[in-house]
Image (tube, rainbow, N blue to C red):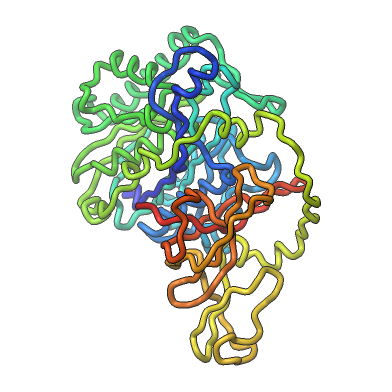
């Protein structure tokens, strides 16, 4: 039976305490904190991080479906960028699912259908969002950032999908047009009483009737809601036991949009035991409901935490940093020369180095080396063999910081900039930026890992590359 074979997740280390927002505007705060994508992060970088986490735990895939409402391009396949960063094979089927908060569960259903039909053996469903609430508005405190990835297949399944049920409802509650920077919302009671509650109850009851089940048959019940209040209200309407209801994670990271329900599902799977049934429901202009059952394989999978280790966060940011990173306040223009235009041709030629951090390995002596972009390796630095190289991947290798420099003049949304020389375990060296680091704690010899990040935006093109960050404790 088809189902979930592995999962991974990514939650940014930065947290904005809602108390900070309340103090700024002199209003009440919802308590807790929300996860905030860093100055060099967006939907794509978070999706790549979640996909790589999933690959590490359960291997690659021959399909990748990306679900998001905040893709960086209006006309370009974002899933192709994510698949490149995750180093999937070129034959991989990729597709974007977008324009709906239900995009994640829509992608999950499509992946299941592909596996059952035999058109794909394993499809990775990745959901990521960086939705932005208007300043001083209710959504500013509610919305958070995050990503999750699920591998769907029919072998070594950790959670079988025993059935599903879907309905649609052309109900306008939360929406955003091409001209809108922030989501718009209808009146709260109208959303609850006419849209959300009736739709979710109909989906749950339809699923239970279709498969002749009761709510008491489920060890865990996972469902989307716009915030903690709405989530708790639906639990009361369905008369759920408190022990059944999966924490929506809103107090720790906020509502992560199309990734929210799937992140909750990943958290439920993290603590599931063999035989546990999970009721899973996504919402948005209707609802998708699923019945999952954990298998014995889940005991082998749960070797280290996926979600729980990322919830606490590592760095608190100020409200000023948040406004700056999100481009919500004007900044003084840099006095340094403007960057030269990106070469789309060189980006294409060097795509393996740029998106998956490939270098070269000498066939004669086995020494790896990473050449600067645009300068292909021809002579081995170790044995001087000429044109005797094979591709070598650096992005998944352990590394240490050999040396570093702090640049006070580097134009950055998070000054000062930190540039480092990084040595890889097994050989190879790269000069790159450091990110997600406390400058006071940076030291020579510290362990670092590579992370896919946004470098800059120029002339309509988003430029991505790899940076180094301290290894998480």
* Total count of labels: 0
Res. 338 visible in picture:
yes
Q: Please name the residue shown 64% across and 48% down the image.
A: 77
Res. 171 visible in picture:
no
In terms of image quadrants, where is residue 465?
bottom right
Image location (x, y in percent) of residue 278? 27, 35
Between 402 and 171, the one nearer to me in the picture:
402
Q: Please name the residue shown 42% across and 51% down the image.
A: 115
Image location (x, y in percent) of residue 233? 34, 14
Between 86 and 406, the one nearer to me in the picture:
406
In terms of image quadrants, where is residue 90?
bottom right
In the picture shown, does residue 49 fall above or below 292?
A: below
In the picture shown, does residue 147 fall above or below 171?
A: below
Image location (x, y in percent) of residue 283? 45, 26
In terms of image quadrants, where is residue 212?
top left
Q: Please name the residue shown 22% across and 25% down the image.
A: 214
Image location (x, y in percent) of residue 303? 25, 55
Side (left or right) of 321 relative to 104: right
Q: Please name the residue shown 76% across and 59% down the image.
A: 344
Side (left or right) of 470 relative to 391: left
Between 405 and 352, the one nearer to me in the picture:
405
In the picture shown, does residue 420 fall above or below 11?
A: below
In the picture shown, does residue 383 fall above or below 192?
A: below
């Amino acid at each position: 039976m088809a189902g979930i074979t592995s999962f991974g997740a990514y939650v940014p280390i930065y947290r904005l305490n809602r108390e900070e927002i309340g103090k700024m505007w002199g209003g009440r705060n919802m308590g807790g904190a929300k996860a905030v994508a860093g100055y060099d992060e967006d939907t794509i970088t978070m999706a790549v991080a979640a996909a790589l986490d999933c690959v590490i735990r359960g291997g690659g895939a021959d399909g990748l479906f990306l679900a998001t409402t905040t893709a960086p391009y209006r006309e370009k396949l974002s899933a192709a960028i994510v698949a490149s960063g995750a180093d999937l094979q070129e034959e991989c089927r990729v597709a974007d699912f977008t324009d709906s908060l239900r995009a994640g569960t829509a992608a999950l259903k499509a992946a299941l259908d592909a596996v059952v039909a035999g058109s794909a053996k394993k499809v990775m469903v990745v959901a990521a969002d960086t939705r932005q609430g208007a300043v001083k508005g209710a959504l500013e405190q509610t919305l958070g950032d995050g990503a999750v990835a699920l591998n769907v297949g029919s072998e070594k399944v950790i959670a079988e999908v025993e059935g599903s049920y879907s309905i649609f409802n052309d109900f306008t509650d939360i929406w955003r047009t091409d001209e809108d920077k922030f989501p718009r919302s209808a009146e709260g009671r109208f959303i609850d009483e006419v849209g959300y509650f009736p739709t979710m109850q109909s989906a749950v009851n339809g699923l239970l009737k279709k498969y002749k089940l009761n709510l008491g048959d489920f060890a865990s019940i996972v469902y989307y809601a716009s915030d903690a209040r709405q989530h708790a209200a639906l639990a009361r309407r369905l008369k759920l036991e408190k022990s059944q209801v999966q924490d929506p994670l809103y107090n720790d990271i906020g509502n992560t949009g199309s990734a929210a329900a799937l992140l909750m599902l990943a958290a439920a799977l993290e603590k599931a035991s063999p035989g546990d049934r999970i009721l899973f429901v996504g919402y948005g202009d209707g609802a998708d409901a699923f019945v999952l059952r954990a298998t014995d394989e889940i005991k082998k999978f749960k070797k280290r935490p996926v979600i729980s280790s990322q919830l606490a966060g590592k760095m608190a940011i100020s409200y000023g940093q948040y406004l700056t990173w999100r481009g919500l306040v004007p900044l003084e223009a840099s006095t340094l020369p403007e960057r030269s235009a990106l070469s789309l041709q060189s980006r294409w030629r060097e795509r393996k180095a740029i998106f998956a951090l490939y270098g070269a390995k000498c066939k004669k002596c086995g020494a790896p080396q990473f050449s600067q972009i645009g300068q292909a390796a021809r002579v081995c630095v170790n044995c001087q063999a000429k044109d005797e190289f094979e591709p070598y991947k650096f992005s998944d290798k352990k590394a240490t910081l050999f040396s570093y420099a702090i640049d006070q003049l580097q134009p950055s949304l998070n000054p000062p900039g930190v540039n480092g020389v990084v040595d890889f375990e097994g050989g190879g060296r790269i000069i790159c930026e450091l990110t997600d680091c406390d400058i006071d704690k940076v030291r020579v010899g510290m362990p670092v890992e590579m992370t896919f990040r946004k470098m800059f935006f120029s002339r309509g093109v988003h430029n991505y590359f790899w940076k180094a960050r301290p290894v998480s404790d």
